[in-house]
């Protein structure tokens, strides 16, 4: 069934009607199981594992896209002065993505209830972290684009430690996360790309690129907050 549903998402063929929520999540878990584990007494090839992984991503992205209206509904009710709408959307979509990956359809809960809690936690956590970060570093940084004569000593130190973290990959960014950050915030004279442009380069949706960007920035924030030089 998982094969048929993934194929239906890609081609629109093979099913008479859209699967219900529980069926979609069971198919998602089936793909995860087949990707990560071997059936007893059987061997799975690298190609087959990659195929099941692609099916997992197809199902995961479909479920996320189907629930995006839930994200916008929650953003409209969430009040914060710490994040602009794009930042809030990024965090909410990341929360939805995490909820999709972790939801257990066998526990009897509705996914919308589980997802709402996850989205709200993601927005609250991000708002709290942004407030904490701005108290410690009162200048709002897109540090790659500041003019040298506008940088005070605190900002210069922040930039130096940030560049160190990126050069040594102290945040343990994946290759894709590093590529996105490098194109979003180039340290040289290269043109800064939009989320849409990066998505076209790497074959992902704009929202997925946004999620990966925020995850990478979150890793870098954690490294800087733990950096003893900045304490």
Image (cartoon, rainbow, N blue to C red):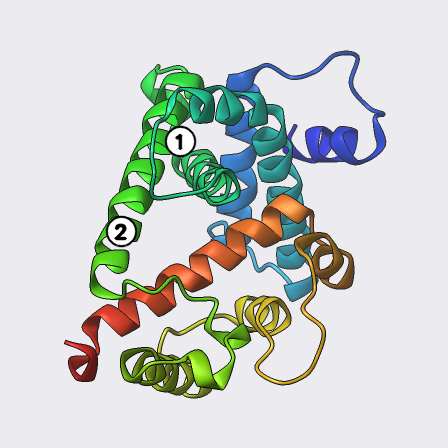
* Mark 1 crowd level (few <14, some 14–19, many ≥20, 10 Å Cα): some
As measured in the structure, the alpha-carbon distance from the residue carrying label 1 to the one carrying label 2 is: 25 Å
The numbered dot on residue 103 is 1
Depicted 81 relative to depicted 72: above or below = below
- Tell me the residue at 60%/59% (across/down): 44
- Tell me the residue at 27%/79% (across/down): 154
Residue 41 in sight: no
Secondary structure, mark 2, is helix
Q: Nearer the viewer, residue 103 or 69?
A: 69
Q: Is residue 162 left or right of residue 148?
A: left
Badges 1 and 2: C-beta atoms under 8 Å apart?
Answer: no
Query: Looking at the rendering, which quadrant does residue 185 occupy?
Result: bottom right
Name the outermost residue toward the front.
149
Q: Is residue 211 left or right of residue 229?
A: right
Secondary structure, mark 1, is loop
Tell me which numbered mark, 1 or 2, is placed earlier along the sequence. Answer: 1
Depicted 177 relative to depicted 213: above or below = below
- Tell me the residue at 32%/65% (across/down): 221
Residue 98: x %, y % from top left? 42, 41
Residue 3 in sight: yes
Residue 169: x %, y % from top left? 42, 81
């Amino acid at each position: 069934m998982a094969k048929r549903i993934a194929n239906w998402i890609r081609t629109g063929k093979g099913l008479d009607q859209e699967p219900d929520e529980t069926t979609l999540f069971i198919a998602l878990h089936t793909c995860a199981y087949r990707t990560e584990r071997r059936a007893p007494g059987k061997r799975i090839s690298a190609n087959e594992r990659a195929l099941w992984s692609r099916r997992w991503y197809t199902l995961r992205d479909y479920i996320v896209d189907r629930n995006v209206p839930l994200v916008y509904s929650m953003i409209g009710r969430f009040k914060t002065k710490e994040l602009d709408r794009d930042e809030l959307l990024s965090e909410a979509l990341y929360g939805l993505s995490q909820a999709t990956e972790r939801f257990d359809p066998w526990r009897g809960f509705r996914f919308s209830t589980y997802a709402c809690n996850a989205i709200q936690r993601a927005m609250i956590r991000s708002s709290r972290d942004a407030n904490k970060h701005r108290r410690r570093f009162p200048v709002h940084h897109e540090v790659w684009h500041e003019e040298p004569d506008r940088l005070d000593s605190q900002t210069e130190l922040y930039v130096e430690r940030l560049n160190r973290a990126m050069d040594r990959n102290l945040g343990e960014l994946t290759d894709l996360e590093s590529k996105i950050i490098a194109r979003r915030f180039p340290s040289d004279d290269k043109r800064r790309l939009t989320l849409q442009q990066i998505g076209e380069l790497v074959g992902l949706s704009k929202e997925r690129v946004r999620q990966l960007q925020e995850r990478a920035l979150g890793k870098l924030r954690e490294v800087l907050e733990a950096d003893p030089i900045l304490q």
